[in-house]
Image (cartoon, rainbow, N blue to C red):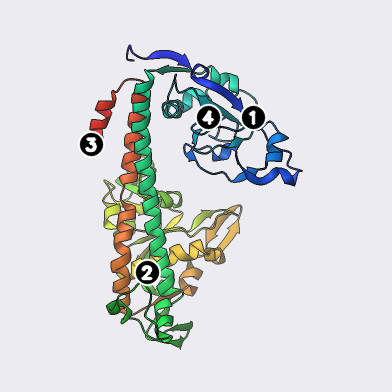
Amino acid sequence: MSSEWKESTIGAVCSRVFSGGTPASTKSEYYGGDIPWLRTKEVNYTKIYSTEETISEAGLAASSAKIVPVNSVVVAMYGNGDTAGRVAITKVPLTTNQACCNLVIDPSKADYRFIYYYLKASYKALVDLKNGGAQQNLNGKLIKSFPIQVPEVEVQREIGSFLESLDDRITLLRETNATLEAIAQALFKSWFVDFDPVRAKMEGRAPEGMDEATAALFPDGFEESELGLVPRGWRLIRFGQLLSHTIGGDWGSEEPDAKNEMRVAIIRGTDIPDLQRGADSRVPIRYTSAKKLATRKLQAGDIVLEVSGGSKDQPTGRSLFLTEGLLQQFDCPVEPASFCRLLRPQSEHIGILLGQHLTYIYAQGKTWEYQNQSTGIANFQTTHFLEAEPVAVPSDEVLSAFASIVCPMIDRSHLTQVQRLAEIRDTLLPRLISGQLRLPEAEALIA
C-alpha cells in the first residue's frame, strides 16, 4: 500500500447514504409514471440509464422511495444467489426499492467511479458481512462502516477514468458483435424466409440494398415443391439431408486416467451465448479417449446444437457455428458436451446457411416444437428435427453470395477481444484500487 493512501470508510466519503422504498402494489396509479424505479435484480455492475419499472409522482410521495442523483453508486443489499453485494452506477436520476443502498459520493472526498470499482473488487469482503437467516442480507450500517483505502481525489479520478474507459471499450465491442449478429439474421430472413429479392423481381422492382450482379442471381417467381412453395430453381430440403456427419457429445473425465488421456475443451449449451460474442474462459477443460475424440473433434464449419438441459421457460436448440478463428482460441482439440450434438454440414457454405437457420428458428420459438419435457429437464427431439425441419436451399451462386457477406460478420463476432479486455480489467482492478499498481504501469500494460 502506498503511503499516500489513507484509511477511510464508505460512509466517510459520502454526502448521503439511504435506501429506497416500494409504493403499494395495490395502487395502480403509483406505477407506470415517468420516474425510473430500480430493483436489486437490475444492479449488476453496469451503468443504469433506464429501469424495467417506473413509478409516478404519487407513488414517490406515498412511499419511502427517494430520488437518487446521477453518478451515485447503488449497492444491492438483499437478493438470492450472488445478488447482494453487487453494485451499479446511476446515469439518470432514479428511485430504488428498499433493497438498494444508495451512496451519494462527496466529490471533494472521493470519485464515484473509484468507489464503484473499489466495491466491485471488494465483492467477497462485502458479502462476508451479510447477516440474517436463509436469505442473508447487507444493511446500510454495514455498508457505511465498510473500510476502504483511498488516495488523493485527483488520483482516484484518474484511476476511475482509466477503468471506465476499459469498460466502455468492452461495451462497445459487445454492442458491435450484437449488431453484426443482427445484420446477419436480418439478411437471412430477407433472403431465405421472406424471399424479398424474389418478390421484388416479381413486382418489377430492383431488390433493395443489392447490386445488379447479386440481384441477377435470384429468380423472379416461385414454384411448388414437395415441402411447399419455394423460389424457382431452389429446393426445400430436410435439415438432416444437408449433413455429412452427426453424433452426440462427450463429457470425459475431470482428470486424465488410463481410459481418458486426451486433453479437450468441451463446449456446453451454457457456453454458446458467450462464445458467439467472443468469450471462452468458461469452457471446461477435461479428458477423453482417442476413440471418442476421433468422431467428435470439432472443425471449422461444424455446428454445435444443444439437445438437452432446457427448462419450462427456455427451450433447447441453442447453436454455435464454428469458425477457424474460434477454434484457434483453444490450445487443445474441442468437442461438444454430452448435452449437445455435433452437426457437420456437407460444405462450409451449407453450414453458414444452417447456422443462421438454427439461430432464426430458436429466436422465433420454433424449437419448442421439437422439444419434450421429462422430470424437469427438456430434451430436443433430434431425430424428428433432422427428418422434419425444412430448409430453403438456393442456387450455389446465391449461397456463395450469402456466405461472402455473412462469414466475415461471424468471424468478427467470434474474436475474443471482449474476453481479453475483460481479463485485463479484472486483473488490473484489484491492484489499481489497492495502490499496488501505479496508473502509468497499468496504461503501459494495455498499450
Q: Which mark is residue 134?
A: 1
Spot occupied by residue 193 in the image (x, y as percentages of width and height): 45, 73
Pinpoint residue 144: horizontal percent, then vertical percent: 54, 19
Labelled disc at residue 447: 3
Disc 1 residue type (three-letter): Ala
Look at label 4 and name its amino acid. Answer: Gly
Question: Which of marks 3 and 1 precedes in the sequence?
Answer: 1
Residue drawn at 51 percent across, 34 percent down? 70
Mark 4 highlights which residue?
85
Residue topped by disc 2: 353
Name the foreground residue: 414 vs 191: 191
Pair 1/4: label in front: 4
| Of callouts 4 and 2, the N-terminal one | 4
Disc 4 on helix, strand or loop?
loop
Specify few, some or many for label 4: CA neighbours under 10 Å numbering under 14, 14-19, or 20 or more. many
At numbered mark 2, what does the secondary structure look like: helix, strand or loop?
Answer: helix
Which sits in the foreground, 194 or 380? 194
User: First in sequence: mark 3 or mark 4?
Assistant: 4
Q: Residue furthest top?
A: 3
